[in-house]
Image (cartoon, helix red, strand yellow):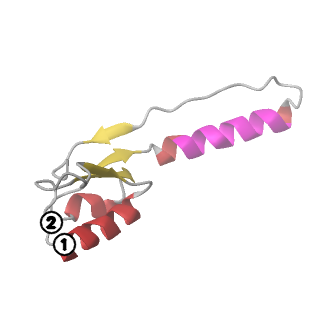
Amino acid sequence: HPLRPQAVFTGNDAMAVGVYQALYQAELQVPQDIAVIGYDDIELASFMTPPLTTIHQPKDELGELAIDVLIHRITQPTLQQQRLQLTPILMERGSA
């Protein structure tokens, strides 16, 4: 079908679950008809059929970094702002 997207990238894995359900109801297959990629890497992602390709956000590392920054801002209020970046990881599974 020319107007059908080749892939759907969702803002989180819970939304991808909804996309799976809608595609199933439309009798479309993941990834044969439409690829699906989520974001979060929730536990359920690896148990979906097919397993969801998703972006893993390092939440533990993000939390630790946020606490460190907060403590530094409290102890050194004049500290210059800084930009911090964490690298997400593509978890390649069966949906894309």
**What residue do we see at 27% from left, 72% from top?**
22
How many residues crowd around disc 2 within 10 Å: few (fewer than 14), some, or many (20 or more)? Answer: some
Q: Residue at coordinates 77% horizontally, 33% vertically from top-left?
A: 72
- Residue 15 image position (x, y, % from top left): 39, 64
Task: Give, as a single range, the part of the protein colored magenta.
Answer: 62-74
Total residue callouts: 2
Residue contact between numbered discs 2 and 1, judged by CB atoms under 8 Å: yes
Is 89 on the left or on the right of 24, as rendered? right
**Residue 28 numbered mark, or none:** 2
Residue 91: percent from left, percent from top: 27, 43
Q: Position of residue 24 (x, y in %)?
A: 19, 72
Q: Dividing the picture into quarters, in which one does residue 48 lie?
A: bottom left
Residue appearing at x 19%, y 73% in the figure: 26
Question: Marks 2 and 1, how far apart in space?
Answer: 6 Å
Instruction: Tell me if residue 8 comes above or below residue 76 in the rendering.
Output: below
Secondary structure of the residue carrying numbered label 1 = helix
Question: In the depicted view, which residue is nearer to us: 18 or 3?
Answer: 3
Tell me: residue 73, above or below residue 38.
above
Taking the view exactly as shown, the residue that stands out farthest to the front is 2
Q: Which residue is mark 1?
A: 24
